[in-house]
Image: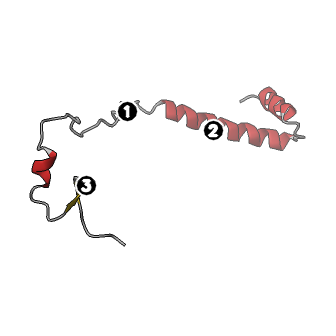
């Protein structure tokens, strides 16, 4: 990072800087840029595949009639199972 660049950034941020601050900023900004260059060296990896549905399809199949279904129920009411009241 050059002195001209640090002066421009200081001017754009409306920051009053002195020579020491400019040198320190240039050094710190250089370190930041070097860190980003290090990130560029990290190999890219393939992302994990998206989740997929593992549930079976909801296929309608032939089943028992209502009468056959309810024939062994202890209690029924209006063609439905009747169970104990839940409080």
Front residue of this view, candidates 37 and 78? 78
Q: Considering the numbered disc 3 on the image, is that residue within a helix, a strand or a loop?
A: loop
Which of the two marks, 3 or 1, is nearer to us in this view? 3
Q: Position of residue 29 (x, y in %)?
A: 69, 37
Q: Position of residue 31 (x, y in %)?
A: 63, 39
The kind of secondary structure element at disc 2 is helix
Please identify the residue farthest to the bottom as the structure is shown. Answer: 87
User: At 81% across and 43% down in the image, what residue appears?
Assistant: 21
Could you say where residue 3 lies in the image, as x and y percent from the top left? Answer: 79, 30
Residue marked by disc 1: 47
Name the residue carrying label 3. 78
Name the N-terminal-most of marks 2 and 3. 2
Task: Work out how far the residue at label 3 is from the one at label 1, CA to CA, in angstroms.
Answer: 55 Å
Label 1 residue SS? loop
For residue 32, which numbered disc appears in the image?
2
- Quadrant for residue 75, please give it: bottom left
Q: Viewed as shown, does residue 68 lie left or right of 53?
A: left
Q: Nearer the viewer, residue 8 or 57?
A: 57
Answer with the quarter of the image where residue 15 lies: top right
Tell me residue 61's x, y (percent): 14, 35
Choose mark 2 or mark 1, whichever is in front: 1
For disc 2, the neighbor class at 10 Å (few under 14, some 14 to 19, many from 20) is few
Please tell me which of labels 2 and 1 falls first in the chain.
2
Q: CA distance from mark 2 to mark 1?
A: 27 Å
Quarter of the image for residue 81 reads bottom left
């Amino acid at each position: 990072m050059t002195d001209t660049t640090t002066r421009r950034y200081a001017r754009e941020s409306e920051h009053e800087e002195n020579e020491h601050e400019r040198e320190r900023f240039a050094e710190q900004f250089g370190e930041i840029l070097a860190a980003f260059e290090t990130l560029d060296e990290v190999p890219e990896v393939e992302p994990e595949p998206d989740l997929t549905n593992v549930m079976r399809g909801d296929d309608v199949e032939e089943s028992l009639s209502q009468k056959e279904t309810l024939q062994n129920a202890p209690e029924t009411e209006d063609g439905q199972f009747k169970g104990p009241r839940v409080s």
